[in-house]
Image (cartoon, helix red, strand yellow):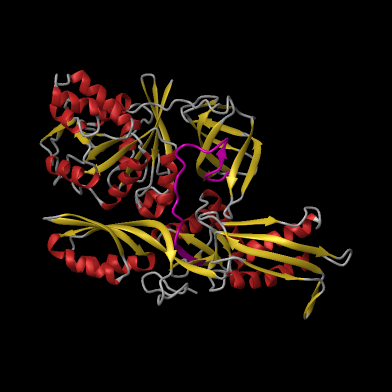
Amino acid sequence: MRTLNIGILAHVDAGKTSLTERLLFDHGAVDRLGSVDAGDTRTDDGGIERRRGITIRSAVAAFTVGDTRVNLIDTPGHSDFVAEVERALEVLDGAVLLLSAVEGVQARTRVLMRALRRLRLPTIVFVNKIDRAGARTDGLLGDVRRLLTPHVAPLTEVADAGTPRARVTRRPPDGRTAEALAEVDTEVLAALVDGPEPTGEDVARALAARTADGSFHPLYHGSALGGQGVAELVEGLLGLIPAATPGTSGGTEPRGTVFAVRPGPAGERTAYLRLYGGEVHPRRRLTFLRRESDGRTTEVSGRVTRLDVVGGDATLTAGNIAALTVPGGLRVGDRLGGPTDRAPQFAPPTLQTLVRARHPEQAAPLRSALLALADQDPLLHARPAAAGATALLLYGEVQMEVLAATLAEDFGIEAEFTPGRVRFLERPAGTGEAAEEMPWLDRTRYFATIGLRVEPGPRSSGGAFGYETELGALPRAFHQAVEETVHDTLRTGLTGAAVTDYRVTLIRSGFSSPLSTAADFRGLTPLVLRRALARAGTVLHEPYQAFEAEVPADTLAAVTALLASLGADFTGTTGGDPAWIVTGELPARRVREAELRLPGLTRGEAVWSSRPCEDRPLKPGNSGPGTGVGGHSGE
């Protein structure tokens, strides 16, 4: 059985879940057609998803066509859940990018296409809702070429678009397709220029090759609700997107990635694993590699106690997906074997909030619930804060609302969130050392000798701890006390922001037996570490977002003036009449202001999209960690 893992991606409300339902129904995987409005779809199975009519977590469903099993991964459309989408991209063989024939190319659609093209992932464009009033076809194709990719060709035609009578017919690859392919295929270009002209078979072969390498995108039309054009789309999926070839590196040892985690009815965590090589069967012992938030890599081992292969097989084979349970629980991002070729590039969340239980007796259950949810999404970053609160890092306000609803419905906890504020970070500016010899007096006597060096670590490494002292010079419990206290202490730097990308080295150590205890080392470490950090100095960094704004031509000057006043660094301005596209990077704390002011400058015609990118040193004269989002001030 050949397997295709296909992701369905789109701007919110373009019809992803409806298309998934149609594909499952048309091929006998479900016996009735679910509806987003009715809240009875197969993949949006959470109560919150059904009420809101949006996808929050990636879901997997399968159908079979001939000798091919198609695993569908339905991904979120809202930008607050970008991490879910990025994780799904890693495990896909190809993607269907949906557009609405009515709303056209939307901001989120462009962001998704950029990611797909960056990964060279085979992608088919599907124009949905052709039977809705206001649907466009020819004009929309021009928008696709201008705003998404010029390397696209329609393989269907639509009659009576914008009416309930809309119907789709196939459009075999022809001369127009060859002209579009010539921009990415040298053989087709040579045949068009020098002759003989490529035959229909030549064009079809080039179309399959260029689709497979992600450089060209076939376009189909249809309606997920009405079913028009869906058969043609499936034909394109099977004929143009190649199934992944199982990897051979590492012999028969299994290699794969955990890309989603769902809680089970008994509190266990069910992990979704995409396998790239080898096999996994029930009761097999597996070892996963996990990258911790401080940059360390740890191992998680256990036997598979439950294995449900999507499609019903007893053994998970290369190219397929399974839901499995391992004692101790797996997390999103855990890897079986070595890294994959398409590891997701996560921009860290930049919105920080404090969560408290509305009822004091629920404080402990709240913290446990948030830690459980953080296991499902390692980018959630939950940690204890002062006065019984829990600090969270998120991507946006919608994610915060969904999290509050999840706590109430799944855990029975009423939680209150402080207004979100942008998270700043400190990085060491240089190298600093400090040491204290035993005994050390400051009201309390610490029977410990500690010397620490602080220095910058590699970008995106988090935090690392090492030794220059001889291993075994201290009891293991004392070593562990120093290391844990270092990481805990650096959650707050010299300005109050968390410290990242640091390396701390223990350069001196000593103890007195039997007087010294681990508590001595936990008490003295922060004092020595603070002094070393002050000598190293830190640089405060603020998060930025890469933005793209499409604005009417006559408003370009006003828009660029606004963005410049907000601190934007421009990377490009393209277009002309009737619209210009402005790209650049903007401090995350100013993004909300840009979103609020753009409609007034552009008669409501601006199209804005932004996504987190790398942070930068805070410019002189700007405020620091207390700066909030949308005018809110953090605690």
- Indicate left or right for 382 with 438 as reference: left
Residue 582 x/y as whole percent: 24, 58
Point 44% across, 37% down: residue: 91
The answer to which image quadrant residue 97 occupies is top left
Query: With respect to residue 481, does 228 lie above or below?
Result: above
On whether residue 336 falls in the magenta region, the answer is yes
The answer to which image quadrant residue 618 occupies is bottom left
Point 35% across, 31% down: residue: 24
Magenta residue span: 330-354
The answer to which image quadrant residue 623 occupies is bottom left
Residue 418 x/y as whole percent: 47, 70
Q: Which of 535 and 23 is in front in this view?
A: 535
Could one spot residue 222 in this view of the protein?
A: no
Point 18% across, 33% down: residue: 180
Outermost residue on the bottom side: it is 443
Q: Which of 188 and 95 is in front in this view?
A: 188
Image label count: 0
